[in-house]
Each structure stands twice: as C-alpha cells, then as structure tokens.
Amino acid sequence: MSDAETSARGAALRAWMVEAERVAATSELGLAPAHIPAPPGNLTPQDYLAAGFELHAAGRGRKEEAGSRFHVNCSADLRNQALLLCGPPESRLARLWMDGHALQVPLDRKGVPICDALVRWLDSYVSTGLLQRTPTPVRAASLRLWRTQIWHIASQGPASFTQAYPPPPAPFGPDDCRAISFGFLYEHDEHFAYEYLDEKGEAPLNIVFSPDLGSQAVLLKGSADWSGSLLWVDGHEVPVRRSDSGDPQCESLGTWLSNRFLCAEVGGLWDHPLADPTVPDSLGKIRGLLLWDNERRVTETFLPKGTEAWTSPAIVRRDNAWHIFPDRDAVKQDRPDRIVPMSD
C-alpha cells in the first residue's frame, strides 16, 4: 500500500474518531447519544499510526483525546480487528466494533461500562489470535461479552433471579465455546459445553447443543441462592416453572430428544404428597418435566399426580404420543406412568 493510500485511510479513521468524540461529548451533557457508525474497515497498523494511535506489541494500540479513549486490537494477520471507544466517565458511553460488527459492551451493577476489564480481555484474546480457533470470531466474542454481562447481573446479591437478563446471542457453535475457554463434558463430544461464572463453582452456565449442533440450549444458575436455572434456546427465553418469589425451578441440564424437542426436569414440588423436605436438594426429590418445542416455540409442563413418584422422569416419543416414565428403571421395563397425545 502506498504512503498516499495510508495517509487517506488514516485521515478517514481520524475523521471517524472526531465524530465519535462529538457523540461522546453530547452524551456527557446528558443528551441521548446519537448513532455512531462502524469505523473504517480493513485497516493496517500504519493507518492507525497515521491517525495518531500509539501502537504496542501484539497488535495493541490506544489513543486518548478530549477525555475519550480509543483502543484497537488486531490479530497478527489483521483478519480480526476490534476497536473500543470509551467516552468520558461522566458520559457512560462505550462502543465496541469487531470486524465491522457492533457488539454490546457489558455494564456493571451501576450501569457503568466495564471498559478496563474489556480491554484486558481484548488484549488476551484478539491480539494473541485465540479467537481464530473458531471460524466465527464475532460470534465467540459476542458470547463472551454476554457471559460477562449476565454475571454482573447475577452477582448482585440474593434473589438476583428476579432481574432482567438479556438473551444470549444466537447462533453459535462448539468452536465458539472452545475459543473462549468453555470446557466440554466429554473429550470427543461437542454437545455439552460448560463454564462456571464464579470461582466457587456455584454459578454454572451450561450449553447443550442439539444432535445436529444447529440449536443451542443455554441454562444459567446464577448463584447459590438460586434453586434452578433460567433457560434460553436459540436466543429465545423459555418460560420455566418458578416459585412465588420468582426463583426458577428448572434443572441446570437439558436433553435434546431430537433436533426439535428439548426436555428438562423441573422441581420445587414441595406440596406433592410424596415430597420429602429433608432431601438436601434445592429442587426436591419429586420432579416434573418441561418440554420445549423449538419449531413452534411453545412449552408443555408435565407434573406428577399425587400417587406418582417421579424422581428422575423421562419422556419418550412413540408414534404421535409422549410416553412419560417415573424413572430410568421404568424406561428399561417399558412401564410408562402416562401416555399423552402430541399436540398438533
């Protein structure tokens, strides 16, 4: 690329930065920030230098002006570029673009963008090329930022399950999970990924992929005072059984019966005649089943009758009916407690 081209691209980047700073200043005055378009794409280190950035090792650079901070992270081959704008603290304005896509900047419990932690993550994953372990780095980054955001909500203290949680980005795949350091339950099986949001292992985030890996069930149990988990499938919130206080009562694992149907155990059935309050389980010994139809996006919940001891219920599709079993032994013996015709 010629010096003239570099100068022109640097000037375009500089013009974009001036407009972004203007929007940040407007926000600082308490006015609603205007839309900021994506920065110029396919830039080189020379372009950033021409725009006044200070570049550091491993594809990192920054520029600070008029109270706003710009951070750039580039992979070694320049295929992945992230540009973060953090406005003055009073503005609470932060914007992130990666490969031309706008991504959501996580906020802390006071609604302040967590810019410093985000910069450290971008340094660790974008500039080092770790996100290149997936063919869709933007998806992986979106999932990681969502994971950060929900933990800031879930860690707000007791009964954080009553807060509003944003849905996870969709779609994404096992490679995206692996690129941001999720673990997998089985070494050679990509269908179950997991991570703990906290250091104590009390806040699991589980992802169960459908047989064809095309759909994602995301289950979040925010902290120790939650009885069960929230559930999303393909970015859509699935309404789960809740207690009177709003505590979710869905198990933190789910099972795909096919590429269309997902089931999960539900608990909290403390008024069931066979319930045992001494069982050290936040969801109780007696369980029901939640069935999610991912094609129609509707749920059905099956609860045991007073004489039915469903301790590990299972559901099997046969012809046009659901066969519901109280436990795994009943499945082996083909003794369903209930046969329910499938809905149209």
Image: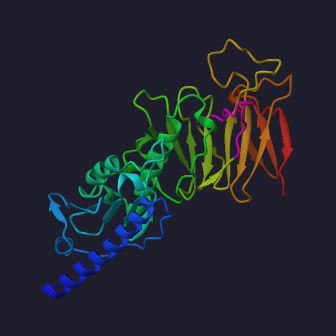
Residue 236 falls left or right of residue 331: left
Given residues 159 and 320, the one toward you in this image is 159
Expressed as whole percent of the image width and height from the top left, the position of residue 50 reads: 17, 75
- Answer with the quarter of the image where residue 59 lies: bottom left
Residue 9 falls left or right of residue 333: left
Q: Is residue 234 above or below residue 290?
A: below
Expressed as whole percent of the image width and height from the top left, the position of residue 257 reads: 66, 47
State whether residue 48 appears in this view.
yes
Point out the image quarter for the C terminus: bottom right
Given residues 241 and 255, the one toward you in this image is 241
Given residues 311 and 202, the one toward you in this image is 202
Task: Tell me the residue at 78%/40% (across/down).
Answer: 301
Q: Is residue 180 above or below residue 254?
A: below
Q: How is the image coloured?
A: rainbow
Dominant SS type (magenta): loop
Task: Tell me the residue at 50%/33% (across/down).
Answer: 203
| Total numbered labels | 0
Residue 87 falls left or right of residue 231: left
Q: Is residue 138 above or below residue 303?
A: below
The magenta stretch is: 239-252
Residue reaching furthest to the front: 29
Task: Tell me the residue at 73%/45% (across/down).
Answer: 291
Task: Tell me the residue at 33%/46% (across/down).
Answer: 117
State whether residue 99 appears in this view.
no
Expressed as whole percent of the image width and height from the top left, the position of residue 1 reads: 16, 84
- Judge whether residue 59 is colored magenta: no
Residue 45 falls left or right of residue 36: left
Expressed as whole percent of the image width and height from the top left, the position of residue 37 reads: 42, 74
